[in-house]
Amino acid sequence: MNSSKSITLAIILILINLPTLNNHSISMEMYPITTTTTAELSNSDWLKSARIAGGDFWEDMTDEEVREKVQDLVEQNVNVLELDIGLIHLYETFFNPDIYIEATEQIVEIAHEEGLAVVEYISGFEIITEKANRKDHSVLMDHPDWLQQDLEGNYAVYGSELGFWVERGDESAWVTPLATEWRNQYLSIIAELAATGVDGIYIDIPYWKMWYSDTNEYTWGSFDAYTIAEFENRYGHSPPQTESEFSLSNPIFIEWIQFRIDIVNEFFEEVSNIAKGINPEIKIIAELWLAQGLHGLYSGADPYFLYEYVDAIAHEFGIKGDAKAMNEELWLYTVIKNLIYRALDFEHPSWVLDYADEQLDSTVLAAANILFEGNFWETKGPEMSDTVGLDYRKQLFNWIQSNNQYLYDSWEVMEPVAVYFSPQTRNFVYSLNASQEPIVNSGGVIDDQIWESYDEYIGGHHCYDLFGITAMLLQSHTPVKIITSRHLPYLDALDVQMLVLPDVAALNTSEMDYIHDFATTKPVISTALTSLYFHNGTQRTDFGLETFFGTNYASTALLVNNENSTYIRKRIGEEYWRDILFGHQNDASTKLSYFLEVLSEQVNYSSPITTNASPYTLLNPYTNSTDIIVKIANFKGTSKNNQNPDMVKFFLEINDSGNNHFETLDEIQLTFGGIVYFNGSSLVLVSELYLDLQDTSWIIWFFSIGSGIVLIIISSASFYYIKRKKRN
């Protein structure tokens, strides 16, 4: 056989075998492909069961072009389309929105024919002037009075350094929501948009800006004329006027923080009233960034306070590539922050906007979100309309739709331990210390995996303690639910078995009354400075719960039992979480053992779950008062650039407080996650998160090998040509 025929045969063999190389497949039955129906859209719970994807539409499409794209989305099992065609956030069209309003009517009408809900994306307080460096008009040039300002009068105007969505030469201008001309025009567009029949209005980045330059990060703006005048009108005096006044010990700064939150809330209240006055069925969705950490306080868009004025919140977390960089500890963090989202959103759904690079990390990300009560937005990023693969999306959304009854019906965590999250403690006691003197800034699992200060992602001592205690409960397979003050009247209805107050420093009288009532029959664990402060951050002379604890602030006793109260003076959760972050597994294990010993010996509590599952196979049992299911997400074996969890096998047994017994007869076996159901006799895996994942790394391998072969051919030909030329 001559050399040219050998090379040709080698290439043919490579091409024949490429599709089977590195095919990642899980053995599990496939559900039949189903599509969104008009009946599903007509269900008022479409927000709750949302399978979300962005779509690439534009303002001058034909009906045929729109219909083709809509049908593609329906084929992918999408039921909520996020539509972004440039309305509001582009300065060029802000005063001329008619073409976008007409396009919205067209797209909505066709989408509704196919049973697809449509939420239209608009910006909050940002307006972009495209190619402003080549134009005579921009927001800065035409309307400088609209713009947010810092104390020195610098405008909140940025170029491409702000983020991926600002192109080179563009101007990103951030307006104060109190600018009269801007607000009137914005609200007029809201009214027109509501009349199009669109199902929801999706408002992104409704923020006060904190960062004006690399040397001016914490400005607590805006100090423009409109905003200062409104503050003075409400409070009768000026806001803080120097950076030295940005202190939680300064009552005027506390007023300023609350004022910034109030203005954002009132903006959404007015948007909602106008939109629903025209279309009572329309939904208002806010997109927020890092709501589990400090950013809600920085921006003024705090979901805890915003809750009453929106129908859903889309929680954005991470950037493109973050999911691929996760490991077991960071997936644990992801689950806990999702539980915080659910606590903050209370009765509203939690849309989670995360980003993935490839099918594997997207699948792990989906497990972390949907199996812990969130709605998944399938996107690759950085654009919201991207995807890691259309066939992949179709499979994933089919699985979600097929298991809709388990994921989004009226399930509550079965006999949970409730861990108390206090935004007031985060905001008014610990926020400035966390931003100025980070508890954890870098090192451990953070390096090269999570960018910027980790404290922005968590939020000070209370939040660190909450993350650590929740982690210990999850890893010891204890049913857990994070709650806020809104849940306190419903602790009995939620069948809460124990309440944990992780350094909840700021408590008011009403909260403490609920805690006392709960403790008449069930245990309460408190740590560190719980109840030492009022809601506004003012320190009490002693614990507000001093009598309840059976100890005071001046005491040095590390652990005190007083009837149903157990007080731990240390932040045991924070210590555990720091050990987890820095990979100090032995120290973490010691703290976990101590915590479990306190639960069993001091509190007389033991988890109703017995299992040999990994600490990184996380699960929660749920009940709807009739049935019992267990949702499981597995992260065992994940590491940076390896989002392929180990297949796990384990038994599971549940003994509830009514002496009912539920157990598996056969081992549960799964990889990414799944749903276990009690069928009347035993716990069985009713549905595994199955996807036929095609590892696209073979494409890179093909081109690498192909390039090598081509190089060999060229080199051989060149050598042959040179050799022949020498002979001649």
Image (cartoon, helix red, strand yellow):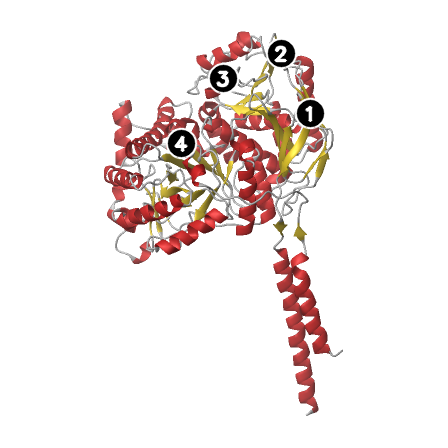
According to the image, label 4 marks what residue?
311
Q: CA distance from mark 3 to mark 4?
A: 21 Å
Q: CA distance from mark 4 to mark 1?
A: 40 Å
Q: Nearer the viewer, mark 4 or mark 1?
A: 1
- The amino acid beneath tag 3 is Tyr
Q: Nearer the viewer, mark 3 or mark 2?
A: 3
Residue 186 image position (x, y, % from top left): 28, 40
| Marks 3 and 2, the one that precedes in the sequence | 3
According to the image, label 2 marks what residue?
560
Asked if 160 appears above or below 47 in the picture, the reply is: below
According to the image, label 3 marks what residue?
490
For residue 681, the mark is: 1
Note whether residue 169 is visible. Answer: no
For residue 562, the mark is: none
Q: Residues within 10 Å of mark 2 (few under 14, many from 20)?
A: some
- The amino acid beneath tag 1 is Ser
- Front residue of this view, candidates 311 and 51: 51
